[in-house]
Amino acid sequence: MPELRDNPYSNFNFIVSLGGDQGTGDLGATVGGFSDVSGLGMEVKYAEYRNGNEKVSTVRKIPGTHTNDDVTFKRGLIGSDDLKAWLNTARDGTADARTVTVSLLDEARETVATWTLRRAQPKKWTGPTLGGKGGGDVAMEELVLVHEGIEYT
C-alpha cells in the first residue's frame, strides 16, 4: 500500500507486466512500454430490500455480485506483434488467461501500489490512426483486456 504523504503520487511512473512472453515488466524484459493504462475499476451491485414491518420507510442495501471494468492499455507502435498475437489466440478459440500487473512507482522508482488483474484475456486490439498531413504524432496501438478480478495492494 502507498504510504501516507502530503503530495500525491504522479501518474506517469508505472510498469506493466502482461505475463507470458511479456515477462515481469522490468526494463528490458518487455517489448515496448505503455504510455496509458485506464479502466482499473470494479462495481458492486446492490439489491434493495425492505421488510413489510420496518418502522422506517427506507430500503436496505444488500451487496450482491460485482463486475470488473475492462482495462485499456496504449503504447507506441514498435513493430512487435505480441499484443495482436495474444488477441489472435483468443480469436482462434484458445484461452490464454494471464496474470497482469500494473505497478505505480514513486520518485525513487520503488513500487508503492500494485493492481493485479486475475485471468486477464484480450478483448480488443486497435491499430494506429494514420494521417498524411505530417506532424509529430506517434502511431499508437491499443489493447483492451477483460479479467476475472482485480486486487489492489
Image (tube, helix red, strand yellow):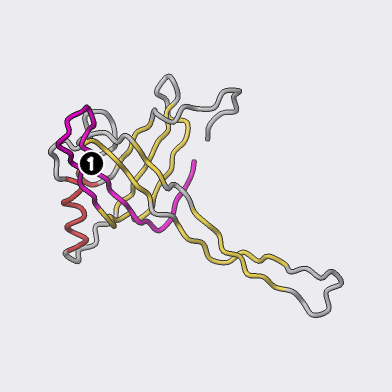
Q: Is residue 67 above or below residue 31?
A: below
The residue range painted magenta reads 125-153
Going by the numbered disc 1, the residue's amino acid type is Gln
Looking at the image, which residue is at 74% across and 74% down? Answer: 50
Horizontal placement of 62 versus 140: left or right?
right
Which of 132/38 is in front? 132
Element class at badge 1: helix
Q: With 150 as the anchor, is 62 left or right in this view?
A: right
| Residue 75 pos. (x, y %) | 26, 38
Position of residue 6 measured from the top left corner of the image (x, y, whole percent): 61, 23
Q: Residue 147: image x %, image y %?
A: 37, 56
Which residue is located at x 28 percent, y 48 percent?
143
31 or 144: nearer the viewer: 144
- From the viewer's perspective, tell me whether residue 149 is left or right of residue 96: right
Above or below for 139 versus 86: above
Vertical relation: 111 (above or below) 93 = above
Residue 145 colored in magenta in the image: yes
**Quadrant of the rendered image containing residue 27:** top left
92 falls in the magenta region? no
Q: Which residue is mark 1?
A: 22
In terms of depth relative to the viewer, which is nearer, 131 or 118? 131
Determine which quarter of the picture holds residue 141: top left
Say which residue appears at 29% left-offset and 36% top-offset.
34
Q: Is residue 100 above or below residue 30?
A: below
> Crowdedness of circle 1 by 10 Å Cα count: few (<14), some, many (20+)?
some
Residue located at (55% from left, 59% from top) = 44
Image location of residue 96, percent across then percent down: 24, 57
Q: How many marks?
A: 1
Q: Residue furthest right?
A: 55
Residue found at the far front of this picture: 133
